[in-house]
Image (cartoon, helix red, strand yellow):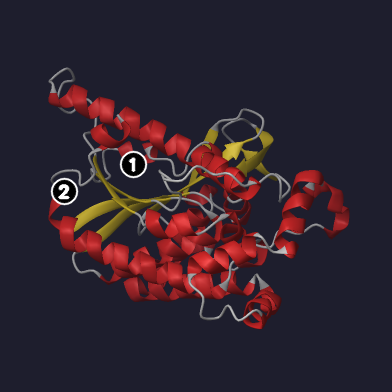
Amino acid sequence: MVRINLALQGGGAHGAFTWGVLDVLLSAPNIEIAAISGTSAGALNGAALKAGFLSGGAEAARENLDWLWGKMGALSGPAVSQWLAGWGMGSWGAGAVAKALEYSAPFMMADMASRMMSPYAYGPFYSHPLKPIADAFSYEKICAQDGPQLFVCATNVRTGKARVFTREEISTDVILASACLPTLFQAVEIDDPQTGQRDAFWDGGYTGNPALWPFFEPHLPDDILIVNINPIERAATPVTPQQIQSRMNEISFNSSLLSELRAISFAKRLIHQGAIKEGDMKDVNIHMIADDELMNELSAATKMVPVPTILTELKHAGQRAARSFLEHHRDKIGKESSVDISAMYG
């Protein structure tokens, strides 16, 4: 049995890729998920996994993830599916659908409105579309001591710092805060015992996407498996307004992760050089599952609009990527990193 920590990135509807990864990991024999750190969609995936796992083990966790993404696909409503079908896009690939959606009049109008209108302008008509889903989670299981420990990251608006919630601190508001894009949603206010006041929170992706430092606790395993859904690299220079905005968001939402990986790379170098006494600092192993090729075909539009056909393709891509990781790197878990972070991030 090997024990791992899962670091689940946020990225809107692209979190369906993580759904596929988790589906395979939960089916794999002799792998124990010790802890999960999730932000935004990663927090939703982590909450669904833990609640399902404590209800009936790995199979129930897989079923709960299926339920979650079925609900996510329903958020776009039948209009999107009918629009795609009307344009004959049912058989198109993910990249083609992404471009069609990105340059469609309805999406461009909604995107423009989000830049010109505050989410506070809706007054009593405002509602968070994820609230019914978050309300349906079994928090007595999510907050339980048993099963994988869950960490959820959100950004404190007042201080600009990351806040990681765990165990009994996790609630509907915490999940919504972790997924709160400030141009779309009103800040989520939470009574924070750490500050002794009621603080407003935004999406955790700005400060921890996801946060890795909770895994440095001595009782947790040394291996961190990052499920990355925001491309680290893009070969082509973005030139359209949509491409520029999308790449800006990717860089912003990867910056905290890259900073932590650089710090880990530096710490590992000191440990291996003997500059740090053995046992004084955790020597973690880093692994990553990603599909940058697919994510480069998609866009900010497919993050914001959960198109059922794209969600299904993302799930299948996540399953393929997870199987490939297990085939090529499973033997490294518990022994060494499968990612050369010195070369990639140092």
Query: Label 2: how many residues lie within 10 Å, few (<14), some (14-19) or many (20+)?
Result: some
194 up-or-down from 32: above or below: above
Q: Which element is circle 2 on?
A: loop
Q: Residue at x 18, y 20 (%)?
A: 276
Report which residue position mark 1 lands on.
Answer: 215
Residue 130 in sight here:
yes
216 up-or-down from 328: above or below: above
Determine which of the numbered discs, if any, sits on residue 308 in the image.
Answer: none
Q: Residue at x 72, y 57 (%)?
A: 108
Picture quarter with the C terminus: top left
Report which residue position mark 2 lands on.
Answer: 334
Could you tell whether 24 is left or right of 79 in the image?
A: left
Q: Residue at x 63, y 49 (%)?
A: 242
Q: Residue at x 39, y 54 (%)?
A: 292
Q: CA distance from mark 2 to mark 1?
A: 14 Å
The amino acid type found where label 2 is placed reads Gly
Q: Which element is circle 1 on?
A: helix
